[in-house]
Image (spheres, rainbow, N blue to C red):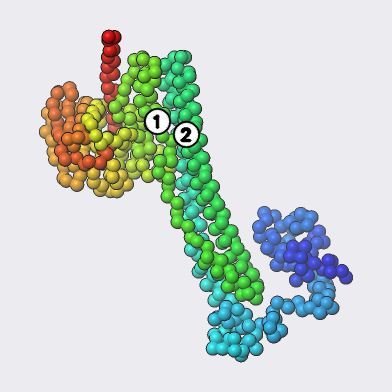
Amino acid sequence: MEEEDLTCMICCNIFRDPVVLSCSHSFCKDCLQRWWRNKHERECPVCKTVSSSAKPPVSLVLKNLCEAFLLEKGKKPHNEDLCTLHSEKLKLFCLDHQQLVCLICRDSETHSNHTFRPISEAVEQQKQKLQETLNPLKERLVGLKEVKVKFDQTAEHIKVQAWHTERRIKKQFQKLHRFLNEEEETRVAALREEEELRSQMMQEKIEALSREIDALSDAVRAAEGELEAVDISFLKNYKAAVQRVQQRPLPEDPPLPSGALIDEIKHLGNLSFNIWKKMKDIVSFIPVILDPNSAHPNLVLSDDLTSVTLGQERQLPMNPERFYHLASVLGSEGFDSGTHSWDVQVGNSEAWTLGVIAESFQRHAENPIGHWRIGYGLGVYAARASPNPGKVLVVRNKVQKLRVNLDCDRRTLSFYDPKAKTQIFTFTQLSTERLFPFLNTSGKLSILPSKVLVKVKPRA
């Protein structure tokens, strides 16, 4: 019988424990089981016929023919079980050299004073060691997959942000009539470009993370494949397998990228004012634009980013700029010099807090320091500069509108009731860091527009 008739088409070696499928094709028993392990159906590797049996019968006739063929060729079915130095049966495993040895090897000078174990005992011990070495890789793989989920969520949210931003841009442009089409197209193009750049950045990070995951997955599959090998084959390859696993670096969780989200401020902040500079038309100017990337998931911002309302929690991706412990939002711009003023409509909100926070404010901490603010709740007005305790304020009339004056040069922050024309409270000795407007509410707060004055310089 020809050798090719006795050759497994999976491993390309002489059959070992050959099994016969219903389609009459034969394969090594172990080869076929490994082939099926990665398939959805038990199909023949040659003709793709689906096998009706998960355990096809062993062909004793074919097995005998294979053994006879090997004997005729002067080969042994288990030639790999023999020592390459002494042609004796391998019976022991040297723990010092991490290799299989025969009885002659054991008594040789090379293995003098070494420790040996029976093969059956060594297999279990070495498999356990390899599994322990493999565990950190598998844990890191799980961690990287979890981070990739967050990256995927961020990438998807960028697209959602882009869609909402475009809708708001178009809504404002509709109010400015047809001659603003060119300006609208320019700004939408800028948004598209930023979306593409930020999406490309996130895609690169996701692809890099995917490559890392694939590399770790390959390493895990390769090591697990070694665990499935027969005893002799496993121990022969054990040392190299352990070295490959140990040499595989364990990457750290890549941090969520700060500033990865669409910069809505660039597209929406003072949008009508910037258009006014080109159109010389009547526009409103908002002194403080709220930053949606900092807003607590329970806060909903208006389309023009000037009002904030407490609502139901939204599903948003994790990003470093966002508040999670406080139902708060920041102004988009920080101040470290000059004087700045803005009016806030508090209306009938049952509880609110207004003020500024330092740039170093730990917005994810439970008791952060670096904020100066006054608040209202349960009918009481109070002022506090962390970490100092709060101070109750005496306010005769309920405030509907609050004016905030920040003087960075004098490092003071003052609050006024513009209707009553009275000063409510002033903080001194503010931080020299950049300070950001801070709003916290259980209802609705709105930044009111400032008056725009146009002075025409007379010609000489």
User: Which residue is depicted at the point 43% across and 45% down?
Assistant: 257
Left or right: 172 as drawn, with respect to 217: left
Circles 2 and 1: CB distance less than 8 Å? yes
Give the numbered dot on residue 318.
Answer: none
Q: Is residue 371 above or below residue 110?
A: above
Of callouts 2 and 1, the N-terminal one: 2
Left or right: 343 as drawn, with respect to 312: left
How far is mark 2 from mark 1, CA to CA? 10 Å
* Most distant residue in the front direction: 460
Left or right: 388 as drawn, with respect to 180: left
Q: Which residue is mark 1?
A: 266
Kindly indicate the quadrant of the structure image that contains residue 282: top left
Q: Which residue is mark 2?
A: 194
Q: Quadrant of the N terminus?
A: bottom right
Question: Dot 1: few (<14), some (14–19), or many (≥20) neighbours within 10 Å?
Answer: few
Element on which disc 1 rests: helix
Element on which disc 2 rests: helix
User: Which residue is depicted at the point 20% across and 44% down?
Assistant: 386
Image spot of residue 78 (x, y percent): 73, 77
Q: Quadrant of the C terminus?
A: top left
Left or right: 207 as drawn, with respect to 103: left
Image spot of residue 199 (x, y percent): 50, 39
User: Which residue is depicted at the point 48% across and 26% down?
Assistant: 188
Please name the amino acid that badge 1 sits on.
Lys
Q: Is residue 179 above or below residue 35?
A: above
Can the viewer see residue 176? yes
Image spot of residue 329 (x, y percent): 31, 36
